[in-house]
Image: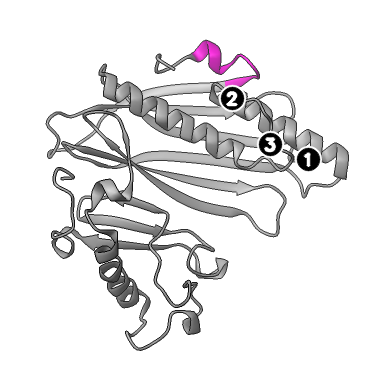
Amino acid sequence: MKRLFPLSLLCLFTACRVSTSSIELDAPSSPEKPTIQRQQYEYTGAGRCDTTTRRGISFRADYVLLKDPTKASQIINDSVQALVRSSVMGWLDSAPDTRQPTDLAAAAHLFAADYRRLLKDVGMVGGCWELEIKGDTVYVGPQVLTIRMETYANTGGAHPNTFSTYYSFDRATGRQLRLSDLVTDTTALAPIVERIFRLKQGISEEQRLEEEGYFAETGRFVLPEHVGVGRKGLIFYYNPYEIAAYAQGPIEIVVPYREIKEVLQEGVL
């Protein structure tokens, strides 16, 4: 999408409530202070959660876009909006719909339709389905922008699910960055992260991670799926089930830049 706020499209498939607000982001290290536009969406259409009958869905999204009129910012905005829509689609319980939503309202419509389909087939889905997505900036530097998205979902399972994801972008091109774009050698990086992980979790070098209840492939420490750029260091975030059981909760490790200066890609900071 080329327009930052396609309100007419946003309400095309279902009723909704949308609001936007602009804030100046305090980022002294940035060549300029980018304006962040906050987008807020709430599903208000047919089938919205009825607390009396415990039927329907509740869906809200609160995330940020860049207001800068540059091509890179437009690319980042398109990526962020696609990631929010993808987060919704990931919670569809039935067979995946072949249609790809073009906006958030379309994704919410498919989420509501999936709920109704399952309710008709099964008859009991554990009450209302709830989905809430929050996105905000973690770091804005001269070269890199990192956004954290938090998702809360309750879709009738044994317990609600809460997890976070980190996404970093090249401010000059808008390209989404991978871990290999942030460091030169992930093999050399892993033991550094493991050392800080063990220190934070109170695990000595002699203790085996598997014996302490952590997940490790053949005894090998594994880096998390999501890594972000922070002000003090790289952020390594393990969601529940990623390296430990749900009861352990999420685990966040911040590795100071001084610890990884030898493997940090030039131009990250």
Quickly name the residue at label 3.
Answer: 96
Task: Give the mark nearest the N terminus, 3 or 2.
Answer: 3
Name the image quarter holding residue 100.
top right
Residue at the far top in the pictured view = 8
Horizontal and vertical percent position of residue 108: 62, 29
Q: Which amino acid is tagged 3?
A: Pro
Quickly name the residue at label 1.
Answer: 52
Q: CA distance from mark 1 to mark 3?
A: 30 Å
**Toward the viewer: 223 or 138?**
223
- Helix, strand or loop at disc 3? loop
The residue lying at 37 percent from left, 39 percent from top is: 136
In the rendered structure, the answer to whether residue 129 lies left or right of residue 176 reads right
Horizontal and vertical percent position of residue 224: 41, 59
Q: Which amino acid is tagged 1?
A: Thr
Q: Is residue 228 magenta?
A: no
Q: Are marks 1 and 3 in contact (CB under 8 Å)?
A: no
* Residue 101 visible in the current orientation: yes
Name the image quarter holding residue 33.
top left
User: The magenta stretch spans which residues?
Assistant: 7-16
In the rendered structure, the answer to whether residue 16 lies left or right of residue 28 reads right
Mark 1 or mark 2: which is in front?
Answer: 2
The residue lying at 41 percent from left, 25 percent from top is: 78
Which quadrant of the figure contains the N terminus?
top left
Q: CA distance from mark 1 to mark 2?
A: 31 Å
Q: Is residue 36 above or below residue 234?
A: above
Q: Which amino acid is tagged 2?
A: Pro
